[in-house]
Amino acid sequence: MKNIRRFRKLLSIVLMALTSVSLTLFAATAFSETNTEWLMFNGSYSADRFSTLKQITTKNVDSLVQVGRYELPETTSFQAGPVVVKSRLYVTTATATYAMDARTGKLFWSHKYTPKSLGIGTPVRGLAYVDGRIYRGTPDAHLLSLDAKTGKVVWDVVGANAEVGEYFTAAPILWKGTIFLGTSGSDVGAVGHMRAFSIKDGRPLWNFDIVPSSGPGADTWPSDPAKQRAGGGMYSSFALDTATGILYVPTGNPGPDFVGDYRPGDNLYTCSVVMLDTKTGKLLGYHQFVPHDIHDWDIAASPILFTSKSGEKMVAVGGKNGYLYGLNRNLTTVAWKTPVTTIYNADAPLTPEGTRFAPGTQGGVNWNGPAYSPLVNAVYVNTRDWATTVKVGGPEALEYTPGKVFLGSANGFGEDDPASEQSGWLTAVDADSGHILWQYHAPLPLAAAVTPTAGGLLLTGDLEGNLLAFDAATGKMISKKKTDGPIGGGIITYSINGKQYVAVAAGMNNAIMGTKSGPASVVIYALPDKGSKQKNR
């Protein structure tokens, strides 16, 4: 009997040990697979952009050399976030998709989409990948599935109504057989729709209207049927809590942009982050950051999800209004609200004579949003520091024509301050207190993504065309590499066969921001091989 008990005890210990080893191996494998690639616009479902890679560090980052480059055969406002799966890098422009070697930039294939209607002249900021397929939106509101190996179209469906100004510029995310993607069009009188589609065939699964026509929130808009309800478009990407199945959606400004008297009320659910059930699209919660917005102060960038050093599950949100926010995970409590750029005349009424305010209509936090480093317990964000003067228009500015600009102003999106008065800020904020840890003041607006790493780095870029590396803890700039193109797109890091790379989307031709260059490029960096004579660039 004793021998039997001893055998059972020994067997139990062995089984526990085997289980522990199996779980460890599984965790290591999952960790490795998740963190060596860059699988979506912001790296992961939490959208925090943190990379666990640490081959490139604060001590060796200045040794990075350019190991690959691909110049896209188009000059465009390149604001895309690259995606890397295994050894392939995928990137989008408004109408083209490119697949290249993530080590060298050698092109494997490209696919050119021909819009079925005029659509809106906008970039498409990214794509999503799963099981050998790529998914992306188009400027005329189509949703495409492409074969990731060949670029051939698997299916092409209409995802929204381009005739009324709805289009896709955001990068979708995929989860449990579902594509999540929202429409844009706030500035042309369209209503933003957050939608779910089937990965299999693009079949629509559910829809949530950011501007409600009935039900909760509808009473925050005018009841006059002659007035156009508009706004709430989505412009970058989304965050998803895989533990709860909750989708966090950033929403754009109400329309017309600059005439609040046209649309009395808070104008829900614009300038907000809304929480939706991924299975049904049901509204689970929201926080509106700018009620009754009259400055075009969208929540344009994705919120990020993280657990702070103190153990709080939090959401960080950057707004075009110039603030960075820390909230609890259900969006009911603002833990902190920190200004991260110049804020001026925020409460001044807009007039026909003109009102100057900051951030301007392109200022604050735009399409590239916050990032979080658990090593420093810091949230980082880039901002654009410049003001805009807007003149309210007459009755003709409030005439709505489907698909046409619907702003309510006499001078479009306003007159920006001269270039000599524009600048940018990179800010690091303590994730628990909201206190500023450090700031970097750039001579031009900062539009690029920010990416913290386990190597102690914070990677970003500027409109002078430099890849910048900072010590994430102190804010000291430790490397500057010229890419030959203004950077307003993604900056990502990944590993292939044990070698860490950094890829940059450079070449942002954007008249509003005053940036002009040659063709857009994907530029790839890595540490030089031992004995290599590669030029440090």
Image (spheres, helix red, strand yellow):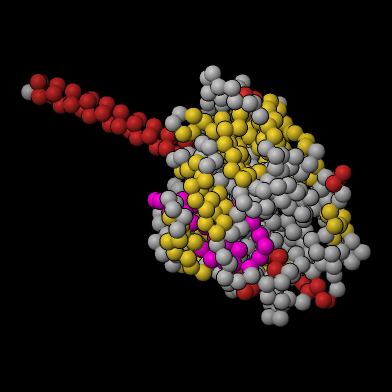
> Is 138 one of the magenta-colored residues?
yes
Q: Eyeballing the image, is 143 above or below 88?
A: below
Q: How many marks?
A: 0
Q: Residue at x 46, y 40 (%)?
A: 87
What residue is rendered at 76% in x and 67% in y?
Answer: 407
Query: In which quadrant is the N terminus drawn?
Result: top left
The quarter of the picture where the C terminus appears is: top right
- Percent coordinates x, y for residue 33 in the rendering: 42, 37
Residue 111 lies in the magenta-colored region = no
Q: Position of residue 74 (x, y in %)?
A: 64, 53
| Residue 240 appears in the rendering | no
Where is residue 440, by image quadrant? Answer: top right
Q: Tell which of 260 and 158 is nearer to you.
A: 158
Q: Is residue 405 left or right of residue 456?
A: right
Residue 211 is situated, as x and y percent measured from the top left of the image, at: 63, 68
Position above or below: 414 against 213: above
Which residue is drawn at the image coordinates 67% and 41% (left, top)? Answer: 381
Residue range (magenta):
119-143
